[in-house]
Image (spheres, rainbow, N blue to C red):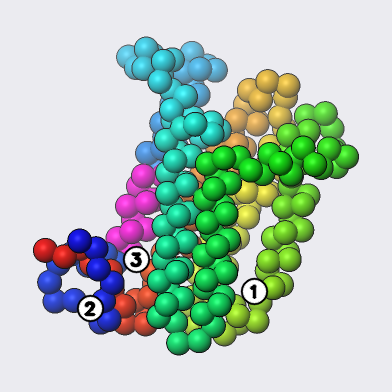
């Protein structure tokens, strides 16, 4: 049973923020490694003894696929952040509304990750286009505006957070936004008709890796905040 307790528990396995971040980082490294290996087999014919697996089941580990293990992993990560934010809001001495609203934002991001809801923005931003290749990336423009609006709305609440928590939140946000917006924009500029040239594939890989790691850092940040409030998550004996 998982429990959240005030002060460090005397029994059971304590789930520390560092442990969570370490495990998630290791999983991300494995997923990125699998993705690179599969793409080398698909596009460069460098397969080795796993050719049959890579050709048949490789799509399950393709970072660019919506129906894949990495997408499921990111969805679960985002949902975990949303849950951690709800817990933080329940125990926060002040500014509970901020934690709760932020949790709703991460619920949306989790749903978007699984359903590709940002495709809606692409369809409704058809007039914002740099070249024909960027047609599927039109959502970036409204995405930037939404990020800016959210940042401004949360600023008063954010400034009241502990200094360490603010720094960790900024770190997580920068990593995630660089992956989700900056690298996505570069992907739109480097993409070819089939989304298979080396430059685009490299940018897309970095993009997805940064997004996953940014979410991990955010989860670490919230768990670290809870620990700073003398709260601990443990698995009971």
Task: Quarter of the image for the N terminus: give it.
Answer: bottom left
Cα distance in 3D space between marks 3 and 2: 13 Å
- Which is in the foreground here, disc 3 or disc 1? 1
> What's the residue at 68%, 39% (across, down)?
119
Residue placed under numbered mark 2 in the picture? 8
Where is residue 164? Give x, y as percent. 48, 78
Q: Which mark is drawn over residue 154? A: 1
Where is residue 189? Give x, y as percent. 76, 36
The residue stretch that appears in magenta? 17-28
Where is residue 211? Give x, y as percent. 54, 49
Task: Quarter of the image for the C terminus: give it.
Answer: bottom left
Residue placed under numbered mark 3 in the picture? 17
> What's the residue at 78%, 33% (across, down)?
135
Q: Earlier in the sequence, mark 2 or mark 1?
A: 2
Q: Principal SS element in the magenta part?
A: helix
- The crowd level at tag 1 (other Cα within 10 Å; few <14, some 14-19, many 20+) is some
Q: Is residue 123 magenta?
A: no
**SS at mark 1?**
helix
- Judging depth in this view, the residue of 120 and 150 nearest the camera is 120
- For the residues bearing labels 2 and 1, Cβ distance under 8 angstroms: no
């Amino acid at each position: 049973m998982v429990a959240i307790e005030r002060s460090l528990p005397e029994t059971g396995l304590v789930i520390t923020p560092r442990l969570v971040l370490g495990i998630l980082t290791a999983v991300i490294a494995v997923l990125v490694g699998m993705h690179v290996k599969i793409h080398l087999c698909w596009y460069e014919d460098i397969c080795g003894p796993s050719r049959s697996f890579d050709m048949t089941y490789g799509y399950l580990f393709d970072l660019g696929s919506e129906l894949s293990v990495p997408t499921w992993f990111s969805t679960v990560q985002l949902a975990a952040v949303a849950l951690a934010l709800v817990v933080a809001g329940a125990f926060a001495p002040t500014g509970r509304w901020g934690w709760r609203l932020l949790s709703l934002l991460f619920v949306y991001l989790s749903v978007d990750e699984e359903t590709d809801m940002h495709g809606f923005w692409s369809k409704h931003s058809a007039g914002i286009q740099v070249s024909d290749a960027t047609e599927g990336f039109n959502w970036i423009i409204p995405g930037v505006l939404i990020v800016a609006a959210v940042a401004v709305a949360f600023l008063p609440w954010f400034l009241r957070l502990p200094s360490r928590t603010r720094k960790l939140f900024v770190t997580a946000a920068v990593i995630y936004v660089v992956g989700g917006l900056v690298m996505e924009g570069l992907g739109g500029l480097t993409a070819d008709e089939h989304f298979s040239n080396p430059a685009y594939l490299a940018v897309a890989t970095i993009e997805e890796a940064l997004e996953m790691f940014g979410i991990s850092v955010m989860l670490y940040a919230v768990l670290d905040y809870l620990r700073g409030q003398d709260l601990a998550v443990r698995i009971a004996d």
